[in-house]
Image (cartoon, rainbow, N blue to C red):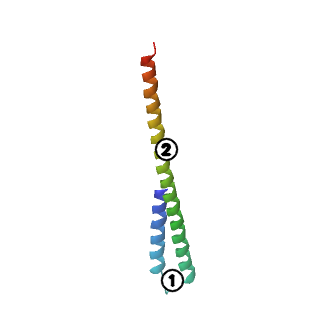
Amino acid sequence: MRNLFFVLLAFAMMAGSTFLVGCGGGVDEEQIQQLNDLKAEVDALQSQVNAKLDEKSDLQKQIADSEARAKEWQGISDAVKRNCP
């Protein structure tokens, strides 16, 4: 997802510079609108990336909590096995 963001950002910057140094007499409204659309798409994708990173962090915390509980229960199980004939 992060690579996609950088590809779109690079495309947007190249497209913007192409619009500014093109053959015409300047930038027209359609080109400005295309650039604004690309910027909005990049912003939306960055929001998605941030949301997925937050989700990943939450899942990693859940995994760590589950592993800690499993280790605790394994310790209890081992103690019971040692104490029972």
Of callouts 2 and 1, which one flags the residue occurring earlier in the amino acid sequence? 1
Q: Tell me which residue sits at (45%, 71%) in the image.
A: 13
x and y percentages locating residue 27 in the rendered image: 51, 83
Question: Hey, what amino acid is under mark 2?
Answer: Gln
Label 1, secondary structure: give it. loop
x and y percentages locating residue 10 in the rendered image: 45, 66
x and y percentages locating residue 32 in the rendered image: 53, 79
- Is residue 79 or residue 15 the one in the foreground? 79
Q: Is residue 54 above or below residue 23?
A: above
Q: Quadrant of residue 37?
A: bottom right
Identity of the residue furthest to the top in this view: 85
Q: Is residue 84 above or below residue 48?
A: above
**Residue that label 2 marks:** 62
Q: Which mark is residue 27?
A: 1
Q: Tell me which residue sits at (42%, 18%) in the image.
A: 82
Identity of the residue furthest to the bottom in this view: 25
Q: Is residue 64 above or below residue 27?
A: above
Identity of the residue furthest to the front in this view: 83
Q: How many marks?
A: 2
Question: Hey, what amino acid is under mark 1?
Answer: Val
Q: Tell me which residue sits at (46%, 46%) in the image.
A: 61
Q: Nearer the viewer, mark 2 or mark 1?
A: 2
Q: Is residue 12 above or below residue 23?
A: above
